Image (tube, rainbow, N blue to C red):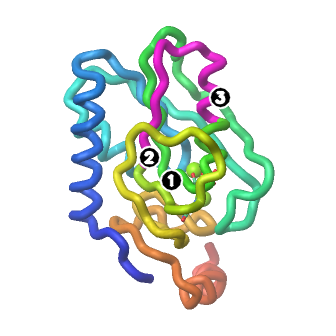
Amino acid sequence: MKILYSEEALRAGVEKMAGEIRTTYGETPLTIVSVLTGSIVLLADLIRRLEMPIRVGVIEASSYGGATTTRGELTINAELLLDIEGRDVLLVDDIFDTGHTLVRVLDKMRELQPKSLRSAVLLRKHGRQEVDALPDFVAFDIPDEFVVGYGLDYDDHYRNLPYLAVMEDADLEQHPKLTAKQGV
Ligand code: 5GP
Ligand code: MG
Ligand code: MG
């Protein structure tokens, strides 16, 4: 795997984005909604850098595509979502690729009538956007490569890598053998 951002680089990027969020909201109480599962590591780091009153909730978005695509049906499960009606809400996700996931989740949340709704992502993939909307806060713009680590998975693995890495062809070939051998 090729490291794209080290732990230190990720920390600096998240800190910078947290500063932009603090500037935008000031002391306004904020409800953070994290899109499971890819954003959990970002969520943990981001909320500890927001020195302001916040509530934290989650929403689940899953797609039944291949391991490296989001093609296929997107299912949104809002059962775990906090009450967001009349609240200032910030949606947090791992990556804005085509943008369909973010747009669908934002649409779903708008039905619940928050007072305001913005979005923050760790990564935006260059040249892949298929929707009109853009995230309000972006920590890193990355090239069009498949990345893992810092919450992002390949086949539900690698979310625990503390850095962000590009999954290369050799890694993809290795992966099924590794998982078969470990029996996971
Ligand atoms: P979109 O709907 O914007 O095309 O896709 C967003 C979702 O696709 C992300 O939340 C993530 O689950 C997945 N995704 C897109 N690109 C990547 C990538 O490079 N690496 C990983 N691990 N997931 C990705
Ligand atoms: Mg996701
Ligand atoms: Mg995934």
Pointer 2 local density, CA inside 10 Å: few below 14, some 14–19, many at least 20: many
Q: Is residue 82 magenta?
A: no
Residue identifier under label 2: 121
Separation (CA) of disc 1 from disc 2: 6 Å
> Disc 2 or 3, which lies upstream in sequence?
3
| Residue 3 horizontal/vertical position (percent) | 36, 77
The quarter of the displayed image where residue 87 is located: top left
**Disc 2 + disc 3, Cβ < 8 Å:** no
Residue type at mark 2 is Val
Residue type at mark 3 is Asp
What span is colored magenta in the figure? 105-121
Residue identifier under label 3: 107
Q: Is residue 118 magenta?
A: yes
* Picture disc at residue 158: none
Position of 131 relative to 145 (above/below): above
| Residue 126 horizontal/vertical position (percent) | 50, 62
The quarter of the displayed image where residue 29 is located: top left
Residue identifier under label 1: 95
Separation (CA) of disc 2 from disc 3: 17 Å
| Residue 56 horizontal/vertical position (percent) | 41, 28
Pointer 1 local density, CA inside 10 Å: few below 14, some 14–19, many at least 20: many
- Local secondary structure at mark 2: strand
> Disc 1 or 2, which lies upstream in sequence?
1
On whether ligand 1 comes within 8 Å of the CB at mark 1, the answer is yes
Q: Quadrant of ligand 1?
A: bottom right
Name the residue rendered at 36%, 73% in the picture.
4
